Amino acid sequence: MMASSFEPEATSSVPTLPDSHSGIPPYLLDKATRAKTAVFEGRTKPLNPRTREVPVVPQGISRDDFLKALEELKAELGEGNVEVNDKPLKDGWYMEHPNTHDMMTILDEEECVAGAVVYPGSTEEVVKIVKWANKWLIPVFPISMGRNLGYGGAAPRVRGSVTIDLGRRMNKILDISPQDYTCLVEPGVSFYGLYEELGRRGLRDHMWVDTPDLGGGSIIGNTVDRGVGYTPYGDHWACHSGLEVVLPTGEVIRTGMGALTQGGENTWGVFPYGFGPFSDGIFSQSNFGIVTKMGMTLMPNPGGHESFMYTFPNEEDLGPLMEIIRPLRISTILENVAQLRHVTQTVAASGLPKSKFYSGTGTIPSETIHRAAAQTPAGDHTWAYYGMCYGPSHIRAYKLAIIDAEFRKIPGCRKIDPFTLPEDEYFWSRDRIASGTPDIHELRWVNWAPNGAHIAFSPVSPIRGPDATKLFQLGKRIHEQYGIDFMPAFCVGLREMHLIVEIVFDRDDSEEKKRALGCLRDMVDEAAKEGYGEYRTHLVLMDQVAGTYAWNDGALGKFNEKLKDALDPNGILAPGRCGIWGKRYRGRGWEMGRGSEGRSEGKGVGERVV
Ligand code: EUG
């Protein structure tokens, strides 16, 4: 079979902004086109023709009623804004991803699949959808843009859910304030999109967007999943200010200053708390409401910036290095969310498949990685620290001198001169990202495996040598046990680190998927035994991870259930997201964990509650 016969979009052009809200900015078009070519060169997986009945009907409603309900919704939203998902499951790629399933699924691909997708055009239409969902008892799963890749993408946790694709029609930048350094956005605004708009308004030199490694994600989606970027504003949730939320029963609330009866827009983005209990937290990593607007702060251009890169030769340098990083980071001499990357990921970021480096079986030998690294402009190493200093040159010089003196305490430490690095070197991608220019470079290591997909293990640790070493050893040991290449990166927050381990796997290889999932489950459990928890996780791991936050007989989980039942008595909104299940689903075996790998569904749902 020819590639074009099963993935027809392989040869088509990449959608661009502003023609498509989820498109690539023109300045990245060439790079995206090359990325697309590389992705499809490594693709052998045929298009899934679907073997199970379509559309998937969620449990608790008959097929006839489901189809009737969708017809009724069409009458409310318009014919074109309700799509039954009865087509083959096209995976596409990063820039042309599906909104019906996870393009990187670790399960059987017909498992976490939507029954239909709907496209609201306003907050009022979102209200109509949740009321409709309550009337018919249909689970709905909101996505902003569906690019939460590595954590489930666009997939609903419950089979047959109706995906609410908020971004397609709700993608306006409602406000940008150059005076206050704030903006107000809808779910369909990506980091690329906001960056482009700053350019259009001539504000790019004035203020910066804090972007994740890949810029195609929704600002709202990433922020409510508590994602991370790489300027000093890296903690997105900490940088948001005020939400508009549709509750599962159809009320609309605004939090923070937006709740003022009149004139809330004036201070929406400048003060996050408003008056009374600070409710925003319950709308992040939850299924308690649908965020339709969000205020976000932007960073003033600091008047200069300078990336730096240091390499360290040995795995054992990790511990001493962390002891050096911690005080510098907490005192903000190290100013941004930096990455400390293992050389295996850097070699994989070349974008070449593993097979170009190694033709044997099992994990790639360390010598092979180091030999490959020795050929790169930065030279052989084990750890690379990518950081940035901000401000005018004399201010940078002061900080850089301290950093240099400290880092050089590690024997064999090298400072890489950026001007020895070619233009397409990974370093320059980090340089752009840490100074507010979104990129698409990070996608490259997904090509490590044919039909490359990735899934993350993301535990939190203090910035301490013994903790970093323990987590690194734990990950390394379990990866070796499962025969998986280990590609860790530490993202240094302010007082903590997120260790990010992305497992790259062939999503057309069910044995490899089983190993990847086994490896993840072991890492989650073993890390939990040592006192480490994840900051965020993939759909299929949510029940397990929620189960590790069970202090005092699962008190937090019970509290979340109480909130869930109060706010969403019928449990229609994103059931199971973050391990939270409404009353109608509990006690029926919906949770996933060890031993339940083949299935994502439980046995039925309970009666209507209200
Ligand atoms: C990355 C970073 C993350 C995450 C998933 C992936 C990127 C790795 C800091 O958070 O959660 C290169």
Image (cartoon, rainbow, N blue to C red):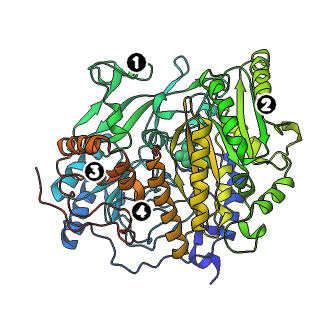
Mark 4 vs mark 3, CA separation in Å: 16 Å
State yes or no: discs 4 and 1 in contact (Cβ < 8 Å): no
335 with respect to 57 (left or right) = right
Q: Is mark 1 on a helix, strand or loop?
A: helix
Residue type beneath disc 2: Lys
Closer mark to the observer between disc 3 and disc 1: 3
Q: What element carries label 2?
A: loop
Q: What element carries label 4?
A: loop
Vertical comparison of 448 with 338: above or below: below
State yes or no: discs 4 and 3 in contact (Cβ < 8 Å): no
Residue at (45%, 50%) from the top-left corner? 537
Closer mark to the observer between disc 3 and disc 2: 2
Numbered label attached to residue 573: 3
Residue marked by disc 1: 266
Mark 3 vs mark 1, CA separation in Å: 31 Å
Q: Residue furthest right?
A: 420
Residue marked by disc 2: 409
- Residue placed most toward the observer, 197 or 402: 402
* Quarter occupied by residue 41: bottom right
249 with respect to 301 (left or right) = left
Q: Is mark 3 on a helix, strand or loop?
A: loop
Q: Under 8 Å from ligand 1: the CB of mark 4?
A: no
Tell me residue 269's x, y (percent): 44, 23
Between discs 1 and 2, the one toward the N terminus: 1
Residue type beneath disc 3: Leu
